[in-house]
Amino acid sequence: MEECRTAVSRVDLQTEEALPSPKEPSSLPSSVDSSVYLQTPLHMTIAYNHPDVVSVILEQKANALHATNNLQIIPDFSLKDSRDQTVLGLALWTGMHTTAAQLLGSGACINDTMSDGQTLLRVAMQRQDSKSVLFLLEHQADINVRTQDGETALQLAIRNQVPLVVDAVCTRGADTSVPDEKGNSPLGLALANNLEDIASTLVRCGCDATCWGPGPSGCLQTLLQRAIDENNESIACFLIRSGCDVNSPRQRGANGEGKEEARDGQTPLHLAASWGLEERIQCLLEFDATVNAQAAEGRAPVHVAISSQHGIIIQLLISHPDIHLHVRDRQGLTPFACAMTYKNNKVAEAILKRESRAAEPVDSKGWNFLHVAVQNSDIESVLFLISVQANVNSRVQDASQLTPLHLAFQAGSEININIVE
């Protein structure tokens, strides 16, 4: 029995640390590092790239239970060398994947951890060794084990920029909604690092392109709102084309956090109109953003575009087939009234071409635009309204029933009197 135990133990003997020696040209294979110690015979067989010898050792292990002699070779696969490598890890990092498969078949543990708690799967990702990662996944490595920092396998694959691994991890059921320590979703993490190929993989694997996360003052915002605020055109258009929510405004946080941003009710279309982001406006409209959505102050995106003086965006919105040009904000201003307020006759005329009666509506006092312009002695506006054939005989809708000419006399404006006569 003593001889048997001795035979078993010798296969797990580990080398000792070598003493420094004079530097001489090395004849060792490139995979061999002479500074490594605590190696078992199996470690050294792999390091010297002798797969046939590994096969012999593993065959002897398989036959050990039926052995009739004292030569029982039962290696301990959990032993680590001075670099914290098991024989399975060493086989992977030297590219001996066939040998690695044999080791697994002989009892090596695929989920063994290093002294710092890292699994082989995590180490392979950090090394950006896609082939070894895929090998480990194919052999059922646990994708749910997190790093000591709480990082998931998916987050690690994204951070180490290995698209094939991201695909493989997602295919095997990784949770694509788990945020990192900063609240970033996997998709947000990929986009923040400009990894659009990985982002595409995540979306294809079912990742939510809307993805709510932390925003200004603690409110909640979508990835699209964040991309628009950060003026990142490629990310914004990617998200829109990936089917994200193009209409929701920001929301309060879980405990009511958020200042004005959480209350303004601005949709992505409002935000893009405010910032003058033409490409994003086109993309939003192409993917059915609600062109008539009203924010907290009742303003539609076209109100925002007019007040922000973004000409191309104004034209894009006005020409939209579903635009409602009679919508009023809380001040009672229609888009036409907004254009008149900002002295933008070009826009006002464009609105009239689309909606010929846009100049006729009256305000809460019963006054139309011509009445107000005459009363204020706004000659430029009076001339414009008459040039677009505003009714010079229209009456104020109150008890006075005054016409523009009456108002001109009241205001004492000779020029306006001459214009409206």
Image: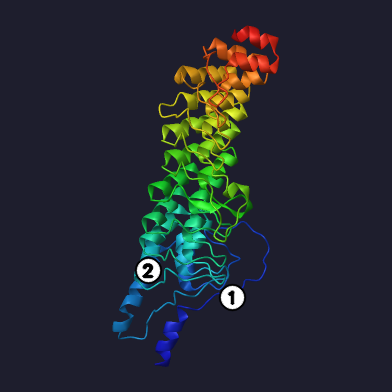
Quarter containing the N terminus: bottom left
The residue shown at (56%, 31%) is 333
Nearer to us in this view, 160 or 384: 384
Question: Which of label 2 and label 1 is nearer to you?
Answer: 2
Image location of residue 31, percent across then percent down: 52, 58
Q: Quadrant of residue 232?
A: top right
What whole-number distance in Å separates the C-alpha atoms at marks 2 and 1?
27 Å
Q: 282 above or below 199? A: above
Nearer to us in this view, 272 or 20: 272
Residue 319 — which label? none
For marks 2 and 1, the one nearer the N-term is 1
The residue shown at (65%, 11%) is 416
Image location of residue 273, percent across then percent down: 55, 33
Q: Tag 2, which secondary structure? A: helix
> Which class describes the residues within 10 Å of circle 1: few (<14), some (14-19), or many (20+)?
few
Residue pointed to by mark 1: 16
Q: 143 above or below 412? A: below
| Residue 139 seen in the current view | yes
The residue shown at (37%, 73%) is 107
Quarter containing the C terminus: top right
Nearer to us in this view, 259 or 416: 416
Q: Quadrant of residue 21?
A: bottom right
What is the basis of the colouring in this image? rainbow
Q: Tag 1, which secondary structure? A: loop
| Residue 194 seen in the current view | no
Residue pointed to by mark 2: 104
The residue shown at (40%, 72%) is 108
Q: Amino acid at mark 1?
A: Glu
Q: Is residue 122 left or right of residue 182?
A: left
Q: Amino acid at mark 2?
A: Leu
Nearer to us in this view, 286 or 63: 286
> Which class describes the residues within 10 Å of circle 2: few (<14), some (14-19), or many (20+)?
some
